[in-house]
Image: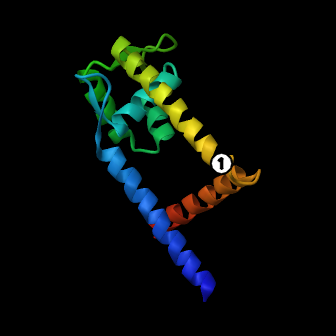
């Protein structure tokens, strides 16, 4: 069937997109000559920068990773001088995360890069009918539910 061929092509394209992003995510990105970071490190810094006084539990939820993985990532970023752990001003038994000056600089640089990427994406979506982005968001949500269901089986 012709529809099956198109669906196969779409699956192949999706795999290519995932693989390209995976490759990009594994590469080291330089924030200045002496600050190499993986994308996962950068995204953790950005999450902390966007959500002031976030704790490990909320960071793990936000990133969709385990508490243990979030804790390990934060420990690594603390050792490298990008993130600080502090006692919450609201309660003595909660540790909150904030960015150091170096972490803030990385956050700012990443946000500039993100704005440039969004401009490129906006340029692409201008070629398509109004509502295309909404349709893609719905498709993305449906695909996530398929993968969540498949991973539980």
**Quadrant in which the N terminus appears:** bottom right
Q: Is residue 73 visible?
A: yes
User: What is the x, y in percent for residue 2?
Assistant: 61, 85
Up the image or down, 148 lies above or below 57; here it is: below
Of 100 and 111, nearer the camera is 111
Of 126 and 130, nearer the camera is 126
User: What is the x, y in percent for residue 94?
Assistant: 43, 21
Question: Residue at image x 39%, y 44%?
Answer: 66
Question: Residue at image x 43%, y 57%?
Answer: 18
Color encoding of the figure: rainbow
Up the image or down, 109 lies above or below 132; here it is: above
Local secondary structure at mark 1: helix
Viewed as shown, does residue 119 lie left or right of 11? right
User: What is the x, y in percent for residue 25?
Assistant: 35, 45
Q: Is residue 152 visible?
A: no
Viewed as shown, does residue 125 lie left or right of 36? right
Give the residue at mark 1: 125
- Which residue appears farthest toward the bottom when viewing the image? 1
Name which quarter of the figure residue 143 lies in: bottom right
Viewed as shown, does residue 3 lie left or right of 49? right
Up the image or down, 80 lies above or below 25; here it is: above
Of 97 and 41, nearer the camera is 41
Up the image or down, 29 lies above or below 77; here it is: below
Question: Residue at image x 26%, y 24%?
Answer: 35
Name which quarter of the figure residue 60 lies in: top left
Name which quarter of the figure residue 71 lies in: top left
Question: Residue at image x 33%, y 51%?
Answer: 23
| Other-residue count near label 1 (Cα within 10 Å), few / some / many at <14 / 14–19 / ≥20 | some
Of 153 and 117, nearer the camera is 117
Viewed as shown, does residue 83 lie left or right of 150? left
User: What is the x, y in percent for residue 110?
Assistant: 44, 28
């Amino acid at each position: 069937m012709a529809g099956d061929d198109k669906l196969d092509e779409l699956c192949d394209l999706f795999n290519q997109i995932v693989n390209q992003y995976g490759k990009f995510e594994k590469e080291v990105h330089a924030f200045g000559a002496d600050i190499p970071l993986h994308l996962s490190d950068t995204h953790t810094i950005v999450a902390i920068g966007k959500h002031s006084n976030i704790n490990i539990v909320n960071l793990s939820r936000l990133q969709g990773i385990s508490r243990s993985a979030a804790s390990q990532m934060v420990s690594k970023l603390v050792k490298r001088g990008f993130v600080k752990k502090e006692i919450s001003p609201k309660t003595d038994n909660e540790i909150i995360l904030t960015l150091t000056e170096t972490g803030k600089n990385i956050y700012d640089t990443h946000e500039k890069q993100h704005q440039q990427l969004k401009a490129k994406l906006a340029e692409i979506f201008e070629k398509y009918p109004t509502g295309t982005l909404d349709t893609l968001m719905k498709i993305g949500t449906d695909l996530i539910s398929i993968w969540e269901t498949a991973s539980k089986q």
